[in-house]
Image (tube, grey):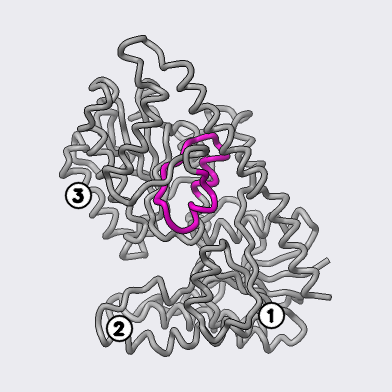
Amino acid sequence: MVRVAFVHPDLGIGGAERWLVDSALALRSLNHPFVIYTSHYDPSHCFDETKQMQVVCKGDWLPRSLFGGRCAAVCAYLRMIYLAFYIVLFSPFTHDVFICDQISACIPVLRMSRKAKIVFYCHFPDMLLTARKTMLKRIYRAPIDALEQFTTGLADTVLVNSRFTLSVFRDTFPSLQHKAVDVLYPCIHTESFDSLESSNQSDWFDLDPWYNKNDIYLLSLNRFERKKNIALAIDSLAQLRESERLPKDLRDKIHLIIAGGYDSRVAENVDHYEELWNLAHSYNFLADGLSDVENINSDDKVHFLKSPSHIEKLRLLDLASVLLYTPSGEHFGIVPVEAMYMRTPVVAVNSGGPLETILDGVTGYLSEPDPKSFAQSVEKVLLARCGDEAEKGDANKDEEKMISKMGDEGKKRVEHNFSFEAFASKLDHYLTARIG
């Protein structure tokens, strides 16, 4: 038995949080006790599984930014350092292993607990997630970047989420070339996905205001952040609706659902949501000019959904004909894995983590990050599934089998490479090996 403490900055809804929740579920399946420490936790904005876990929130009174949204990185580091001091000095629990992710600044403080080993899980180097367009910003970030490299090196074990991130890690932290770093792919907790098939549809969220079973739905599932390049999905929809390869009646049926994590406390979420809404409105994709999902009707071509629950996300993946995964250089990307397990073909940018998760032409398509290329990849799926509808009244059987096989191959790939059982076994190995 290994007693584990997760140390995480903000237990909201996102890829990093999904990894933490799946890791906690893996520990539970292995009978390793754990507690989650975080500087922010809102039960109304979290993954449902955390409500049945032991979560300790400390330091949320500290500011998230200063001077009208500035110094967010410094504040995030200070919040994590404060949280680490609480764990070491005041926590009533005993820990054998700390698992930290996202922010490594807490590691020197955690090392004060000399008996516990420290695992740092690197989703992506933090220093690469912030633009440095001005000299002042470069000066501001210099000590923060140096601190990130130094404190990351203090971890007993460093894990990364993909071979792509490993290569970036080596290039970004030259002083850590000697550090042993292993790849631990994220997984999906397939039990909750499998339960969709046996669940009562009345338990799913209400799609009636805008859902039509005869229409075609494309899905974008990402946090409302500019780096996710969600605008590419809207621009691709515009290309599809002008495509001469698709029959007009088919084009008229295509809708795009844009769903993802949204936090009203985060200025970028608020601003980018408005930017995307304005882009959709400029294409006349919003019939009545209203932006909230509860006000949207079936005449809209783009539908926005903020912070869907887990069951809502599963329902969206189930009804979507294609998942559009638009980030470039994404370090891993769990959403394409979730889509493949739900037998939904994926069209993703041909860089970063999707190169390791998606088999081009087998479980989906890898495309250049431009609307024309994306639209052409989506066309392949839509033509196979629905293209002959106008002439024959039904999709071509051979092509339909090809799409069905693509879905089957996607699920098979997830089961073989990103299963919960394999993830739990590997995580257990790292924890028990380091304790010994």
Give the percent coordinates (x, y) of residue 290.
22, 41
**Mark sitting on residue 156:** 1
Q: Residue 87 carries which label?
A: none
Task: Please give the residue where the numbered disc 3 appears in the rendered image.
Answer: 278
Q: Name the residue under label 2.
A: 137
Mark 3 or mark 2, whichever is nearer to me: 2
What is the secondary structure assignment of the residue under circle 2? helix
Q: Which amino acid does label 2 sit on?
A: Lys
Magenta residues (range): 335-359
Amino acid carrying mark 3 in the image: Asn
Q: Residue at x 52, y 77 (%)?
A: 59
Q: Mark 3 near mark 2, Cβ–Cβ under 8 Å? A: no
What kind of element bears circle 1? loop
- What crowding class fits label 2: few (fewer than 14 Cα within 10 Å), some (14-19), or many (20 or more)? few
On-image quarter of the C terminus: bottom right
Residue 313: give x, y in percent of width and height: 49, 42
Q: Is residue 232 left or right of residue 324?
A: left
Up the image or down, 252 lies above or below 326; here it is: above
